[in-house]
Amino acid sequence: MNPPVHAWAVWRVYNMDRVRNGKADRDFLERCFHKLLMNFAWWVNKVDPAGNNVFEGGFLGLDNITVLDRSEKLPDGATLQQSDGTGWMGMFCLNMMRIALELARENKTYESTATKFFEHYVYIGSAMKHMGEDGIEMWDAQDGFFYDVLTHRDGSHDKFRVRSLVGLIPMFAIERLEEKWLEPFPEFRANMNWFLKNRADLVERCVTTLDTDEGKVHVLAVMNPEQIHKLLRVIWNPGEFRSPYGLRSLSKHHERHPYALGHRSIGYEPGESIAKLKGGNSNWRGPIWFPTTFMMIETLRKLRKAYGGKFTIPGHSEDETPINLDELAGGFAERLIRIFARDAEGRRAVFGKNEKFQNDPHWRDNVLFYEYFHGDTGEGLGASHQTGWTALIASVIDEWRK
């Protein structure tokens, strides 16, 4: 399936079960890990044919979020180096590293496997900042954003300056390694320290080492603190990604500034798309989707654990005070809850202008799990039974309203 979130899901289920039952199910984790190894190899062999650690994984579950149809082959042998595909694979590496270290608590042979995934993450994270001999970067320092790069057969490159989830997903690749926590893993620790020392040219682009009151911490993130600060300002800007109801899939910036490529263009459309692509609507050009907003909340919480409560970004108006990472994560969580909760007038945003659902006592409390949601109003759109991801609201309520 697209995108590769299997390892993240396994790790989350393993820890939920451990907390609930008071005992870790290592057999489950090990069985899944072996299957994930095969899945990882499939991804690497399929979507990184050039071996440059930058990926072109097709539509990755985002349908036509970009100006091009990712399901079709590009003309003239061109390839689309995808910042979201590369970000997903960086996250995959870190998830696998974390699982391998957990298994290494009882079986030390897994330490070398954890090393392999740490190093693979570094290669991927570095490639996003310096791709190939020409040193093409997906990160744009001026805009403070990641963009896809179109590589032509003659070696020339074009950046697609479209501000969408494509440029945010690299944030999902984040983990922290505390020196004290690594003491039970001498082989992994020695290999990591060797890599940090001898491949500083790669490490400096995707590993930040902090000296904290509790000791040294290595933050594994594709971005350094300055770049994270820039990207978070874009994310929290209500004129860009911050909707009253979650994280927009395309920046509201493109409402007045559509991006054009030849006869194709992409603009902000918060509801059902006008453009007919792949035989139907493209619904990733503004609407809110639960999986990606949920992953952003998870990322912000990890950033908080890594950088602490003093990491803040300024508000976007005079009456907005600086906001820290906890408040950012909680802000997006509350926005997702706001889709379903009644407002001051007793109306639920999810039901939009459907008065039957808003007012009828037989329907008003039967909340539906819509596929995606209007980027400005929170109205439920698409299929009304997508419990596969929209039911994440239960987890959000459980974790943020206790």
Image: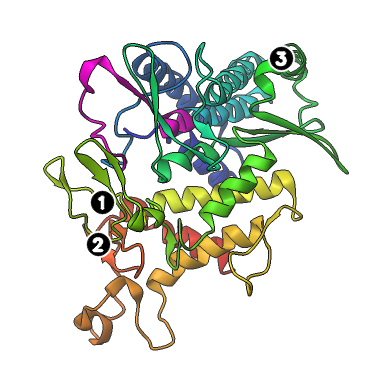
Q: Looking at the image, can residue 273 be seen?
A: yes
**Magenta stretch bounds:** 65-88
Q: Is residue 177 left or right of residue 154?
A: right
Whether pointer 2 and pointer 1 mark residues with C-beta atoms closer than 8 Å, the reply is yes
The residue pinned by badge 3 equals: 195
Q: Position of residue 395 (x, y in %)?
A: 48, 58
The residue pinned by badge 1 equals: 283
Label 3, residues with CA under 10 Å away: few <14, some 14-19, many ≥20? some
Q: Position of residue 227 (x, y in %)?
A: 63, 40
- Res. 381 mark: 2
Residue 255, quarter of picture? bottom left
Q: Position of residue 22 (x, y in %)?
A: 63, 47
Please state which of the two labelled residues, at mark 1 or mark 3, is closer to the viewer.
1
Please state which amino acid type lies under the numbered disc 3: Phe
Residue in front for this viewpoint, 247 or 338? 247
Q: Is residue 105 magenta?
A: no
Q: Residue at x 48, y 43 (%)?
A: 168
Q: Residue at x 39, y 57 (%)?
A: 252
Please state which amino acid type lies under the numbered disc 2: Leu
Relative to 251, say whether 357 is above or below.
Answer: below
Q: Is residue 67 magenta?
A: yes
Mark 3 residue element: helix
